[in-house]
Amino acid sequence: MKNHSEQIKTPKKLNMQKRLIPTLRENKRYILLKDTDKKKVNETIMKMIGIMGYAEAGVKFVNTKKFKNKELLVAVNREKIMNVRAALTTEGIKIIKVSGTIKGLVKG
């Protein structure tokens, strides 16, 4: 008979979550902003579209070294991109470009 420790084997990836299939993932758009900081962007979006709108937009700041120091890259849910753009422009935050990929922003 085998050892007790050999009988009970657990998979190595027991706690890992499965990835979502592509049709269920949120589609993101990337906004390249000029001369601003994270705090100002957060406050502006919260003020204009509220907490629920902010949560639905899924605003995330992307750290990348492909852009200049004064430029900020923000990822937003595709369905809420117009709400976020409207909120940012009312406060005078300059939007350089919007793209579906980071590579598209680098090219432009």
Image (spheres, grey):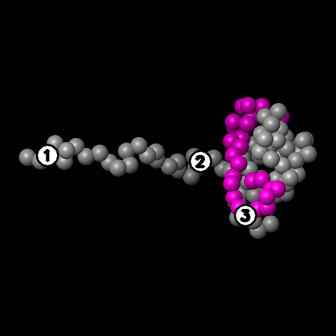
- Whether residue 71 is in magenta: the answer is yes
Q: Is mark 2 on a helix, strand or loop?
A: loop
Percent of width and height locating residue 105: 76, 62
In the image, the segment drawn in magenta is 48-73
Q: In this view, does 44 lie above or below 11?
A: above
The dot on residue 66 is 3
- In the image, what residue type sits under mark 2? Arg
Percent of width and height locating residue 22: 56, 52
Residue drawn 77% across and 31% down? Answer: 50
> Pointer 3: residues within 10 angstroms few (<14), some, or many (20+)?
few
Residue drawn 80% across and 47% down? Answer: 37
Residue drawn 69% across and 52% down? Answer: 62
Q: Do tag 2 and tag 3 residues touch (Cβ < 8 Å)? A: no
Q: Name the residue under label 1.
A: 3
Percent of width and height locating residue 21: 53, 50
Q: Is mark 1 on a helix, strand or loop?
A: loop
Q: Can residue 8 be seen in this view?
A: yes
Given the current orientation, which residue lies at the most extreme top position?
Answer: 51
With 7 as the anchor, is 82 left or right in this view? right
Q: In this view, does 46 lie above or below 9?
A: above
> Pointer 2: residues within 10 angstroms few (<14), some, or many (20+)?
few
Q: Mark 2 points at which residue?
A: 25
